[in-house]
Image (cartoon, rainbow, N blue to C red):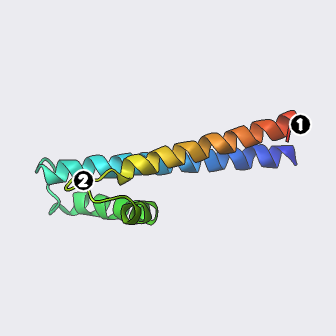
Amino acid sequence: MMAFLSTFVWLIEKVISLYIWAIIIAAVMSTLASFGVLDSRNRLVWTVMDFLDRVTAPILNPIRRVIPFLGNIDISPLIAILLLGALQRLIGELYFRSMMGGF
């Protein structure tokens, strides 16, 4: 049972890490496209950006609805990364406490 819990916690932490990286890559690609460094008309670039937008939209859109409008600056990726990092630490802490018997 402990091996299953350990594997499950590891998997959840890795999925959160991958999601954080997807948010970072999407933000960088969006910035590069807005400055004209990346050509969003290129089929490969568009496909990657579309995929990242579809993956990150479920967490970024609710944050965008809550935070105030700051002009052309979008801080929702930063807030999402901070929240996901906090969730990752919370899961790790709960797992550690359950292993030490202090739950």
Left or right: 4, with 31 as reference point: right
The residue carrying mark 1 is 101
Along the line of sight, the residue nearer the viewer: 28 or 51: 28
The residue at the point 24 percent across, 62 percent down is: 46
Across and down, in percent, residue 10 comes to 67, 43
In this view, the residue farthest toward the left is 36
Which residue is at 23% across, 57% downward? 45
Classify 60 as above or below 11.
Answer: below
Q: Is residue 52 left or right of residue 13?
A: left
Please tell me how crowded label 1 is: few (under 14), some (14-19), or many (20+) other residues with Cα within 10 Å: few
Three-letter amino acid code at the position of disc 2:
Ser
Q: Quadrant of residue 14?
A: top right
**Relative horizontal placement of residue 27, taking residue 33 as reference (left or right):** right
Count of marks, rendered view: 2
Q: Which mark is residue 82?
A: none
At 21% across and 49% down in the image, what residue appears?
Answer: 31
| C-alpha span from label 2 to label 1 | 46 Å
Left or right: residue 85 versus residue 6 is: left
The secondary element bearing badge 2 is classed as helix
**How many other residues sit within 10 Å of disc 2, few (<14), some (14-19) or many (≥20)?**
some
Residue 95 x, y percent position in the rendering:
76, 41
Q: Nearer the viewer, mark 2 or mark 1?
A: 1
Q: Does the CB distance between marks 2 and 1 fall below 8 Å?
A: no
Q: Quadrant of the C terminus?
A: top right
Residue at the spot 76% in from the left edge and 43% down from the top edge: 6
Toward the viewer: 72 or 20? 72
- Look at mark 2 in the image and give the residue it sits on: 30
> Is 56 or 74 nearer to us in this picture?
74
